[in-house]
Image: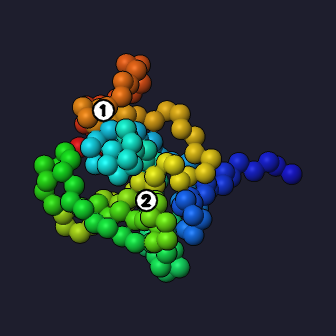
């Protein structure tokens, strides 16, 4: 019998365990350590960790999952110059753990990716992530680590 190479999705779980769901893929497309002031506030820490996954397979949210989440929407101010993008932020309705974000473009089109907060992803490989918005960093980031003053050119 041939060995299977199908990797299994990871599990996303909030602090209290009321919300749990599989990631849309076995590993993220990319990993960011974001040092922007919004992520500092959101995490009450020096940076936020975002594991970027395809949104397909997670969105639209299943009714049971959607019923256990609270959504807060905020305007983004990043590289788009404030041209109307918003970010939908999803929290566990019971414990308040922030679990995921999804950017919605000014025309109402949601991005094809979703940011799942790294601390909630069980078994996440934390290596190889890039540091973004280091202009706001409050900790020293070693020069040999991939880093950008704001975002990489391909994200603009």
Percent from the top left, x then y, of residue 104? 27, 63
Residue drawn at (71%, 48%), measured in percent from left and top? 5
Q: Residue at x 18, y 63 (%)?
A: 106
In this picture, residue 6 sits left or right of residue 129:
right
Colouring chosen for the image of the structure: rainbow
Q: Looking at the figure, which quarter contains the C terminus? A: top left
**Structural crowding at the residue carrying mark 2, measured as other residues with C-alpha within 10 Å and reported as few (<14), some (14–19) or many (≥20):** many
Examine the rendered structure and indicate whether residue 51 appears above or below residue 58: above
Residue 22, quarter of the rendered image = bottom right
Nearer to us in this view, 34 or 51: 34
Q: Is residue 45 above or below residue 54?
A: above
State how far apart marks 1 and 2 are (Cα): 21 Å
Say whether marks 1 and 2 touch (CB < 8 Å): no
Q: Quadrant of residue 25?
A: bottom right
Looking at the rendering, which quadrant does residue 12 occupy?
bottom right
Residue 95, visible in the rendered structure: yes
Where residue 68 sits: x, y (%)?
49, 75
Q: Which mark is residue 98?
A: 2
Residue drawn at the location 41% of the way across and 54% of the way down: 115
**SS at mark 1 in the image:** loop
Residue 16 rendering spot, x and y as whole percentages: 57, 64
Q: How many marks?
A: 2
Mark 1 or mark 2: whose residue is earlier in sequence: 2
Specify the label residue 129 is tagged with. Answer: none
Can you tell which mark lies on residue 137?
Answer: 1
Q: Which residue is more in the foreground, 15 or 83?
A: 15
């Amino acid at each position: 019998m041939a060995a299977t190479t199908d990797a299994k999705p990871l599990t996303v779980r909030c602090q209290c365990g009321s919300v749990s769901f599989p990631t849309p893929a076995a590993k993220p497309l990319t990993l960011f350590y974001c040092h922007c002031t919004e992520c500092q506030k959101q995490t009450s820490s020096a940076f936020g960790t975002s594991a970027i996954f395809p949104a397909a397979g997670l969105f639209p949210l299943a009714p049971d999952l959607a019923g256990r989440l609270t959504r807060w929407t905020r305007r983004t101010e990043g590289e788009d110059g404030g041209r109307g993008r918003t970010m939908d932020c999803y929290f566990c309705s019971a414990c308040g753990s922030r679990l995921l974000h999804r950017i919605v473009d000014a025309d109402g089109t949601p991005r094809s990716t979703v940011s799942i907060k790294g601390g909630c992803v069980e078994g996440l490989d934390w290596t190889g992530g890039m540091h973004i918005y280091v202009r706001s960093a409050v900790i020293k980031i070693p020069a040999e680590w991939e880093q950008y003053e704001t975002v990489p050119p391909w994200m603009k």
